[in-house]
């Protein structure tokens, strides 16, 4: 992978806080994420967060994918592919 | 110090209770608003167990969410911009496509159509949108029996029509179903291509091919017939020289020879038509040629009271095949004579110089050519004359000759007003080399 991976571990966090923490991280790295220089991986064990975080992130125009690991989920947030927009 | 102050209730400054109460209200307000925002973001509200009032201020959820909304808005704006560009591109494609495109709903009412569609089939129609497509495009009050759009609506499948005539134009049509998200057919996309010109060209091509094969057949037959006819004429002449033959017999033999000659002439026409020879170019004076043909014909037709008038301007000498040009002049004058049918008539022959061409015209004051015939008189075998008098090949041979010379021939006529045939020839045809 060419771009940098920023990791956010919110395992053990409660639901609404999960979303807020993830949003905060997205906001903070907005420039890197939007330009495709970095992607963000959010680790959470909260099932609801795998719905709310992707929902919010894609409304903000990011590409989101969720992977299930053994003990947690990994939500990957990155720049949206150009041709998906046009 | 702090603990002490908290313990000693009476030592609290004035207004402390009030401030505490106000702070509480403020916290409640913030929590309520944060929860509202969180609900919009699709998550559960924060309860006081999950995050205490102090924490809610520290995390700054409103700040986070508003910044996120900023990003949502940015994304929306960008998506919108791109949608608009995509729409503009599509519209441009839609409008500049060389085919007619229309979208109709389940009732065959027009929802959208492109410029080409308007131009070809709805030129003077007002308020196209919302009207039935069969009314606007086909000019009829109910859908035609085999309407491809109806078939597509019923079957959900595209329908192709190879050829259909609408308002005097020939079209090829494809109708495809317009499906909505769940796959139901909401309407039909009609795409039609104007193939009128293509069809005309194809017809002309077929016509030419037919003529070519007729020509070949005719040439074959003519060639085979020429020899026996030649023998008939030859032997008839031989027998005629025999002194012992009675006059009565001689007259009959002369008829045989004459008729054989007529046959031979027809055959020569056919041969001329089918293998038109390449012109053999020579420098000559067109006016001199016209005078010679006109004089010889004038002698033949003075009996019929036909006058040939010449009005010849100085023209540059031609580089052309004099025999072939003579044949053209001869054919046109003979046609004029036939058209005058022995009545008193005038045939006017003019010549003049055009830009790069020499022009001559032959005008008569005969009955003229009916509108229905004017496009066909140059076709081979088109004749209005009785069998034996006309073969219908004269003008088509003329056309062939003039085209070979790189020139043009056309006719102007109105019924009752005579006919004028005009021929234009380049001084020096570039495409040909002289012989
Ligand atoms: N000057 C004319 N006036 C009226 N009709 C004419 C004239 N010239 C030609 N036509 C029409 O064009 C037809 C075709 O002429 P042409 O090709 O020379 O064949 P043909 O003379 O054997 O009929 C004629 O049969 C006649 O109907
Ligand atoms: Mg003729």
Image (tube, coloured by chain):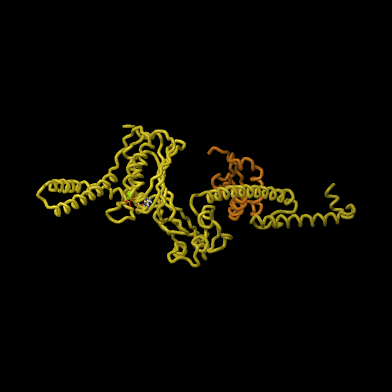
Q: Which chain is orange?
A: A
Q: Residue B259: give x, y in percent of width and height.
A: 21, 52
Residue at (90% x, 53% y) in the render: B14
Q: Residue B186: give x, y in percent of width and height.
A: 52, 62
Residue at (44% x, 59% y) in the render: B165
Residue at (64% x, 48% y) in the render: B77
Q: Which chain is yellow?
A: B
Residue at (35% x, 32% y) in the render: B283
Instruction: Work out whether residue A38 can be spotted.
Output: yes
Q: Nearer the viewer, residue A44 or B410?
A: B410
Q: Nearer the viewer, residue B313 or B244?
A: B244
In this rendering, the answer to whether B159 lies above or below A78 is below
Left or right: B377, with B128 as reference point: left
Q: Residue B293: give x, y in percent of width and height.
A: 34, 41
The extreme left residue here reads B244
Q: Quadrant of residue B38?
A: bottom right
Left or right: B276, with B100 as reference point: left
Left or right: A77, with B371 as reference point: right
């Amino acid at each position: 992978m060419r771009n940098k991976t920023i990791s956010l571990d919110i395992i053990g966090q409660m639901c609404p806080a999960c979303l807020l923490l993830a949003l905060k991280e997205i906001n903070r790295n907005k420039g890197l994420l939007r330009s495709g220089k970095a992607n963000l991986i959010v680790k959470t064990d909260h099932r609801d967060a795998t719905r709310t975080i992707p929902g919010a992130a894609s409304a903000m125009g990011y590409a989101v994918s969720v992977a299930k690991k053994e003990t947690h989920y990994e939500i990957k947030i990155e720049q949206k592919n150009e041709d998906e927009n046009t | 110090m702090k603990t002490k102050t908290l313990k000693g209730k009476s030592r609290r400054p004035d207004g402390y209770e009030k401030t505490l109460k106000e702070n509480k209200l403020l916290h409640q307000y913030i929590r309520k608003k944060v929860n509202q925002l969180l609900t919009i973001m699709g998550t559960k509200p924060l309860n006081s167990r999950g995050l205490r009032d102090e924490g809610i201020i520290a995390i700054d959820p409103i700040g986070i969410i508003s910044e996120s909304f900023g990003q949502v808005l940015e994304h929306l704006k960008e998506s919108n911009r791109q949608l608009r560009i995509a729409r503009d591109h599509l519209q441009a494609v839609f409008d500049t496509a060389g085919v007619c495109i229309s979208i109709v709903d389940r009732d065959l009412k027009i929802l959208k159509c492109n410029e080409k569609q308007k131009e070809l089939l709805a030129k003077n129609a007002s308020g196209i949108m919302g009207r039935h497509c069969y009314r606007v495009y086909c000019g009829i009050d109910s859908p035609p029996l085999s309407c491809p759009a109806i078939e597509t609506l019923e079957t959900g499948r595209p329908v192709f029509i190879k050829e259909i005539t609408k308002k005097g134009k020939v079209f090829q049509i494809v109708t495809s179903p317009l499906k909505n998200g769940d796959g139901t057919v909401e309407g039909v996309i009609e795409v039609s291509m104007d193939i009128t010109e293509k069809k005309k060209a194809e017809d002309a091509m077929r016509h030419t091919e037919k003529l070519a094969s007729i020509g070949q057949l005719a040439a074959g037959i003519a060639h085979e017939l020429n020899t026996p006819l030649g023998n008939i004429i030859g032997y008839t002449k031989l027998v005629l020289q025999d002194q012992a033959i009675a006059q009565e017999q001689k007259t009959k033999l002369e008829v045989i020879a004459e008729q054989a000659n007529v046959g031979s002439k027809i055959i020569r026409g056919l041969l001329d038509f089918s293998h038109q020879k390449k012109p053999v170019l020579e420098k000559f004076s067109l006016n001199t040629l016209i005078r010679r043909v006109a004089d010889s014909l004038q002698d033949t037709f003075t009996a019929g009271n036909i006058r040939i008038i010449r009005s010849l301007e100085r023209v540059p000498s031609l580089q052309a095949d004099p025999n072939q040009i003579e044949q053209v002049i001869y054919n046109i004058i003979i046609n004029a004579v036939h058209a005058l049918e022995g009545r008193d008539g005038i045939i006017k022959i003019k010549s003049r110089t055009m830009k790069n061409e020499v022009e001559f015209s032959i005008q008569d004051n005969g009955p003229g050519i009916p509108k229905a015939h004017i496009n066909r008189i140059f076709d081979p075998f088109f004749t209005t004359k009785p069998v034996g008098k006309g073969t219908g090949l004269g003008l088509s041979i003329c056309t062939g000759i003039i085209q070979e010379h790189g020139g043009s021939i056309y006719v102007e006529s109105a019924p009752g007003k005579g006919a004028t045939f005009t021929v234009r020839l380049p001084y020096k045809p570039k495409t040909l080399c002289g012989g």
